[in-house]
């Protein structure tokens, strides 16, 4: 009979551990949390030091019964839930429900799921860290106090089903404020002038005109350009100075949770939620041939860049064997953590560098393989020599003008040999000149041509998922382990949408944000939320008590909440927009209101009069087509899944059809039409009406126009902030401005 019971969170992890520990152990899984606050009420006793009312999560009764039964057969109980605050809280709850007399269960921390690490951890158990439990408890209570008291306010002022979150709403605010910056941005015109020059060696290059009469040249109007061009055309060009310097680029640190999400989004196009899901499988273990189940990476929820001495030694040996001594720095590289970082875990790294991405590729899914390669290469790169460039700078005189050309040539790849994606990151935003090899100071240069170019200043870019993660991390808002769920919630609530991989607030998102910011300016501010994160850290470090931290937050919050709730009718009324239109049923004014499905028109005499109708711009319009059932006109309507065609005789006739763009399917031999569809996240895409026989799909509407470059028979209509409206060939990427 087994003498020891080991309890983990994940069934997948349990299977891996059973193969390491042998017959003397039973390994059971809690399958995540087993206790939580009640879903149907606040569950926090505000008058009694915010005592939480934890209860068994629905459906977890069977799991708890199995854990209790197993614990009754065991002499020793070890709890090995994830090594973070949340895992510590789960361990505490498991201990609580087991309620077994005798020595308390031992706490085991697995920072990697490999046999040596697991056996060592099991042999050296500790006790549950109550400071970590209290820090997680404080976070849970704070989030419940905000979510369960502010969300009902949104239901009563905007629409049912909305939610507010202590950190979630700050993330929404960041996205909305960036959108406001973009809308308020006024573009400014400016011009640059480049000169194409040829030295005696005939190696033509370009240089920027940077100064006029020793002052930086600033040109804002074409009229100014027209004054400079004739003078530059007749000027005498001479190379005044040529300098060559060695520029070194340092390798990036190993990945942590936030940088993993950023790198995966940027290089693999994986969202934060998807990245963490795949990383979890790599951490918990994958079947690798004769090795069996093997944990491939260290724990993926970490904000520490620390690396163990054993891992450093292994990295240096691997670099020497694979890349050679030239790529190995004299000493290991040590990176500094941010002030707010918790140093309980190492950085995210491979558990065994002998398991190269190519060696185990056949055992992994394509997504696992890509993410593992990213983690593996980044870790090796972090311990390699810097990349080295030769940078050549030319300074050229042209009468009263000064020109400059800068070129950079990679002479030693260094860490770029492993971290290949860094080559894209390394490319300067400003294009670099191709510098002639044979050119001498004092040499006269022949002017070939002048290139004046008009530019316009651009607004700050919208956030991508990776950029938002970076912003939250840098501002100290929330914890990196929560970013994936935060972004996912914003999508689920339809507060934001993704267009061209950029995050846009929806009309609903902007409305919710304005209400929260106007009425709870401190609670949902970046600074306040970051300050609260430090308070939670102080609880973890044992320098503060969680009820005190919650009380300090709740006293001013409750006063603000009471004031806001007293004004909710006034706030709700402020969201209504007068239309000047009379209700056809009672003669009262019609107003625009918010509802679960968006904005609509309703009678201001509600509830006496319940007349409602869609907004004018959302009224169905005739499509020019006839109903196949009754012959009545078909109307273009908008529903839950986007636009569709519906019979004007509804409800007498319930005929419906997909919204037809009128464009023939571009796929050769297909007689289908391109119809508009909507994805699960609410984003519009375009597909063939003959699906699944025809698999044509596009995020951009197809246009039947031949590509002038490659002759492809259709192009895609696109619209971006920088380029405006244009057509792009899906085959050769040729662009045609519209």
Image (cartoon, rainbow, N blue to C red):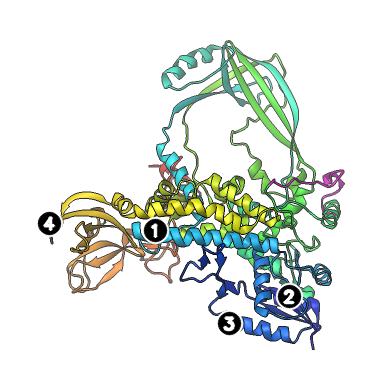
Label 4 and label 1: CA atoms lie apart by: 31 Å
Q: Residues within 10 Å of mark 1 (few under 14, many from 20)?
A: many
First of labels 3, 4 by sequence position: 3
**Element type at mark 3:** helix
Pointer 4 local density, CA inside 10 Å: few below 14, some 14–19, many at least 20: few
Vertical comparison of 127 with 615: above or below: below
Instruction: Measuring from the top left, give residue 373's x and y in whole percent.
Output: 70, 58
- The residue beneath circle 3 is 61
Question: How far separated are the C-alphas under marks 2 and 3?
Answer: 24 Å
Q: Is residue 337 magenta?
A: yes
Magenta span dominant secondary structure:
loop
In terms of depth relative to the viewer, which is nearer, 270 or 509?
Answer: 509
Residue 448 counted in the magenta span: no
Mark in front: 1 vs 3: 1
Q: Magenta residues?
A: 321-339
Residue at numbered disc 1? 153
- The span from disc 1 to disc 2 (Cα, nearest Å) is 47 Å
Q: Which residue does the numbered mark 4 point to in the structure image?
A: 587
Q: Earlier in the sequence, mark 1 or mark 3?
A: 3
Q: Which residue is mark 2?
A: 16
């Amino acid at each position: 009979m087994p003498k020891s019971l080991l309890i983990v969170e994940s069934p997948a992890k349990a299977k891996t551990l059973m193969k390491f520990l042998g017959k003397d152990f039973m390994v059971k899984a809690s399958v995540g949390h087993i206790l939580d606050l009640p879903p149907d009420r606040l569950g926090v006793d505000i008058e009694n030091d915010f005592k939480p009312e934890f209860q068994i999560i629905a459906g977890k009764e069977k799991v708890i019964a199995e854990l209790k039964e197993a614990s009754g057969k065991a002499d020793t109980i070890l709890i090995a839930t994830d090594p973070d605050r949340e895992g510590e809280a789960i361990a505490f709850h498991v201990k609580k429900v087991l309620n077994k007399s005798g020595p308390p269960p031992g706490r085991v921390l697995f920072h990697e799921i490999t046999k040596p690490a697991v056996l060592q951890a099991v042999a050296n158990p500790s006790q549950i860290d109550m400071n970590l439990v209290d820090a997680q408890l404080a976070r849970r209570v704070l989030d419940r106090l905000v979510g369960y008291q502010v969300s009902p306010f949104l239901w009563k002022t905007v629409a049912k089903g909305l939610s507010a979150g202590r950190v979630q709403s700050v993330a929404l605010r960041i996205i909305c404020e960036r959108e406001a910056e973009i809308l308020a941005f006024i573009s400014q015109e400016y011009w640059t002038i480049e000169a194409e020059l040829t030295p005696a060696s005939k190696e033509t290059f370009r240089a920027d005109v940077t100064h006029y009469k020793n002052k930086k040249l600033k040109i804002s109007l074409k009229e100014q350009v027209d004054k400079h061009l004739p003078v530059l055309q007749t000027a005498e060009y001479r190379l005044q100075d040529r300098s060559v310097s060695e520029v070194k680029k340092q390798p990036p640190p190993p990945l942590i949770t936030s940088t993993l999400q950023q790198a995966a989004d940027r290089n693999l196009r994986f969202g934060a939620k998807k990245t963490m899901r795949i990383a979890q499988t790599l951490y918990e273990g994958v079947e690798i041939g004769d090795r069996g189940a093997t944990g491939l990476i260290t724990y993926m929820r970490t904000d520490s860049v620390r690396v163990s001495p054993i891992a450093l030694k292994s990295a240096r040996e691997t670099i020497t064997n694979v890349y050679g001594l030239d790529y190995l720095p004299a000493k290991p590289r040590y990176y500094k953590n941010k002030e707010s970082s918790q140093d309980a875990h190492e950085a995210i790294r491979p558990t065994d560098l002998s398991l190269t991405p190519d060696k185990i590729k056949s055992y992994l899914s394509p997504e696992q393989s890509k993410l593992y390669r990213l983690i593996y290469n980044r870790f090796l790169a972090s311990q390699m020599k810097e990349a080295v460039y030769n940078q050549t700078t030319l300074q050229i005189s042209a009468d009263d003008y000064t020109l400059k050309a800068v070129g950079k040539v990679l002479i030693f790849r260094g860490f770029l040999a492993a971290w290949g994606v860094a080559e894209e990151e390394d490319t300067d935003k400003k294009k670099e000149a191709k510098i002639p090899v044979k050119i001498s100071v004092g040499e006269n240069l022949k002017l070939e041509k002048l290139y004046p170019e008009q530019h316009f200043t651009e607004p700050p870019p919208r956030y991508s998922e990776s950029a938002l993660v970076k912003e939250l991390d840098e501002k100290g808002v929330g914890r990196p382990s929560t970013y994936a769920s935060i972004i996912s919630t914003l999508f689920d609530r339809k507060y934001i949408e993704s267009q061209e991989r950029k995050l846009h607030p929806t009309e609903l998102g902007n409305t919710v944000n304005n209400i929260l910011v106007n009425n709870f300016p401190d609670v949902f501010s970046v600074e306040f939320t970051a300050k609260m994160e430090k308070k939670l850290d102080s609880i973890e470090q044992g320098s503060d008590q969680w009820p005190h931290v919650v009380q300090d937050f709740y006293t001013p919050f409750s006063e603000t909440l009471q004031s806001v709730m007293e004004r909710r009718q006034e706030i709700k009324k402020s969201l209504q927009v007068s239309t000047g239109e009379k209700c056809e049923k009672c003669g009262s004014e019609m107003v625009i209101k918010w509802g679960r499905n968006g904005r609509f028109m309703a009678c201001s005499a509600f509830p006496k009069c319940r007349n409602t109708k869609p907004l004018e711009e959302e009224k169905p319009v005739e499509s020019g087509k006839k109903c196949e059932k009754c012959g009545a006109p078909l109307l273009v309507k908008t529903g839950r899944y986007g636009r569709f065609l519906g019979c004007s005789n509804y409800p007498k006739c319930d005929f419906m059809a997909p919204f037809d763009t009128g464009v023939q399917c571009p796929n050769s031999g297909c007689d289908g039409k391109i119809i508009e569809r909507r994805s699960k996240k609410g984003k519009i895409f375009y597909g063939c009406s003959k699906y699944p026989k025809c698999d044509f799909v596009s995020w951009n509407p197809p246009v039947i126009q031949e590509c002038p470059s490659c002759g492809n028979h259709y192009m895609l209509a696109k619209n971006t902030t920088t380029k405006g409206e244009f057509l792009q060939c899906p085959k050769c990427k040729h662009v045609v401005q519209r």
